Image (cartoon, grey):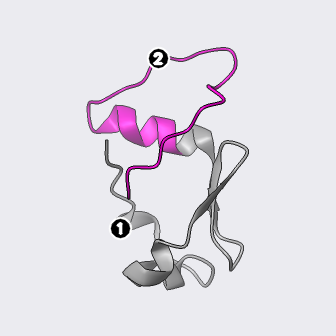
Protein backbone atom coordinates (compact mmCIF):
# COMPACT_ATOMS: atom_id res chain seq x y z
CA UNK A 1 0.00 0.00 0.00
CA UNK A 2 1.10 3.54 -0.66
CA UNK A 3 -0.02 6.96 0.46
CA UNK A 4 1.10 9.96 -1.57
CA UNK A 5 2.04 12.66 0.96
CA UNK A 6 3.70 15.05 -1.50
CA UNK A 7 0.88 17.60 -1.15
CA UNK A 8 1.05 17.39 2.65
CA UNK A 9 4.70 18.41 3.05
CA UNK A 10 4.22 22.17 3.38
CA UNK A 11 5.36 24.23 6.33
CA UNK A 12 8.45 24.28 8.49
CA UNK A 13 7.94 20.95 10.23
CA UNK A 14 7.06 18.96 7.08
CA UNK A 15 9.57 20.49 4.62
CA UNK A 16 12.45 18.22 5.77
CA UNK A 17 10.34 15.18 4.81
CA UNK A 18 10.85 16.11 1.15
CA UNK A 19 14.37 14.70 1.53
CA UNK A 20 13.89 10.95 0.97
CA UNK A 21 16.72 10.03 3.35
CA UNK A 22 15.13 12.04 6.15
CA UNK A 23 11.67 10.71 5.26
CA UNK A 24 12.95 7.16 5.74
CA UNK A 25 13.82 7.98 9.36
CA UNK A 26 10.16 7.70 10.41
CA UNK A 27 9.19 5.56 13.35
CA UNK A 28 5.85 4.28 14.58
CA UNK A 29 4.80 5.70 17.93
CA UNK A 30 1.60 4.01 18.93
CA UNK A 31 -0.32 4.13 15.67
CA UNK A 32 1.22 7.37 14.39
CA UNK A 33 4.07 7.95 11.93
CA UNK A 34 6.61 10.35 13.48
CA UNK A 35 9.97 11.84 12.50
CA UNK A 36 12.91 13.07 14.60
CA UNK A 37 11.99 16.73 13.98
CA UNK A 38 8.52 16.33 15.52
CA UNK A 39 6.54 15.91 12.29
CA UNK A 40 3.79 13.32 12.43
CA UNK A 41 0.73 12.05 10.59
CA UNK A 42 -2.21 10.85 12.60
CA UNK A 43 -3.62 7.37 11.94
CA UNK A 44 -6.98 8.83 10.91
CA UNK A 45 -5.29 10.97 8.25
CA UNK A 46 -3.36 8.01 6.84
CA UNK A 47 -6.51 5.88 6.83
CA UNK A 48 -8.54 8.54 5.01
CA UNK A 49 -5.71 8.99 2.49
CA UNK A 50 -5.79 5.27 1.71
CA UNK A 51 -9.53 5.46 1.14
CA UNK A 52 -9.11 8.42 -1.22
CA UNK A 53 -6.87 6.38 -3.53
CA UNK A 54 -9.32 3.49 -3.53
CA UNK A 55 -7.61 1.03 -1.23
CA UNK A 56 -9.64 1.46 1.93
CA UNK A 57 -9.11 -0.45 5.10
CA UNK A 58 -11.74 -1.92 7.38
CA UNK A 59 -12.55 0.34 10.31
CA UNK A 60 -12.11 -1.42 13.63
CA UNK A 61 -12.75 -0.33 17.18
CA UNK A 62 -9.09 -0.80 18.11
CA UNK A 63 -6.22 -0.74 15.59
CA UNK A 64 -4.17 -3.87 15.16
CA UNK A 65 -1.21 -4.11 17.49
CA UNK A 66 0.94 -5.68 14.79
CA UNK A 67 2.52 -3.34 12.26
CA UNK A 68 4.52 -4.33 9.22
CA UNK A 69 6.78 -1.76 7.57
CA UNK A 70 7.33 -2.43 3.90
CA UNK A 71 9.08 0.87 3.11
CA UNK A 72 7.27 4.07 2.33
Horizontal arrangement in the rendering, residue 59 relative to residue 7 (left or right): right
Residue 6, label in figure? 1
Residue labelled with disc 2: 58
- Quadrant of the snapshot with the N terminus: top left
Query: Going 39% across and 61% down the picture, which residue do you hit?
Result: 5
Q: Residues within 10 Å of mark 1 (few under 14, many from 20)?
A: few
Residue 58 in the image: x percent, y percent? 46, 17
Position of 55 relative to 8 (above/below) = above
N-terminal-most mark, 1 or 2: 1
Horizontal arrangement in the rendering, residue 70 relative to residue 65 (left or right): left
Foreground of the two, 68 or 46: 68
Where, by quadrant of the figure, is residue 31 drawn?
Answer: top right
Query: Going 38% across and 57% down the picture, which residue do you hit?
Result: 71
Q: What secondary structure is found at the residue carrying circle 2?
A: loop
Residue 26 in the image: x percent, y percent? 57, 66
Position of 18 relative to 33 (above/below) = below
Of circles 1 and 2, the one toward us is 2
Residue 55 shown in magenta: yes
Q: CA distance from mark 1 to mark 2?
A: 25 Å
Residue 55 in the image: x percent, y percent? 30, 30
Q: Which residues are magenta?
A: 46-72
Q: Main secondary structure of the magenta part?
A: loop
Horizontal arrangement in the rendering, residue 13 relative to residue 50 (left or right): right
Q: Are marks 1 and 2 in contact (CB under 8 Å)?
A: no
Amino acid sequence: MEVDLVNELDGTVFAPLKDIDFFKEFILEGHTLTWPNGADFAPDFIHSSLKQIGIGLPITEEPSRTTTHTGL
